[in-house]
Image: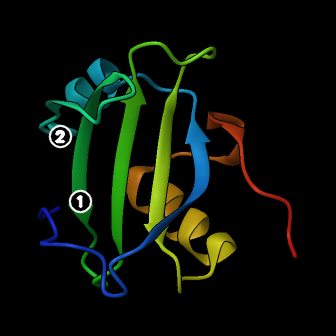
Amino acid sequence: MAAPARFPSGERRPVAELALEPAELTDRYSLEFGDGDDGLDYFRAAAIELPSGQQFLLLRYRGAPTSGTMVYADVGADPAACRKELLGELGLTEADLTWWPEAR
């Protein structure tokens, strides 16, 4: 999995929250998380691109009220399709998600 330069539209939206923490994702998939600060809180983030070209940002804020890692995709991407592809690529199931947006 490669790191994308940026989302095609330049905007992102949340598509899911994985029950796994960044350290677990690093151990399982060798993802490299970097530290950052957006002025609101410190975070750990990793950007990935699947073989299909679908891009994701995995983000965990230090002060988040729940455990897990948020998953963001391009605002123009279909959230359900993104979840399905990411879970399949990582060998995970919906049981490994703690949240996802309702269909609109």
Q: Amino acid at mark 2?
A: Leu
Quadrant, the N terminus: bottom left
At which x and y percent is residue 19?
57, 27
The residue tagged 1 is: 48
Residue at 12%, 64% (x, y): give it.
Answer: 2
Residue at 53%, 45% (x, y): give it.
Answer: 92
Neighbour class for label 1 at 10 Å: few (<14), some, many (≥20)? some
Mark 2 vs 1: CB contact within 8 A: yes
Along the line of sight, which residue is nearer the eye, 75 or 2? 75
Q: Quadrant of residue 102?
A: bottom right
Left or right: 94 in relation to 88: right
The residue tagged 2 is: 31
- SS for callout 2: loop
- SS for callout 1: strand
At which x and y percent is residue 95?
71, 37
CA–CA distance between discs 2 and 1?
Answer: 8 Å
Left or right: 92 in relation to 1: right
- Asked if residue 80 is positioned above or below residue 36 in the image, the reply reads below
Residue at 35%, 78% (x, y): give it.
Answer: 54
- Mark number for residue 10? none
Left or right: 27 in relation to 84: left
> Can you name the residue that lies furthest to the front here?
39
- Asked if residue 71 is positioned above or below residue 81 in the image, the reply reads above
At which x and y percent is residue 11?
41, 73
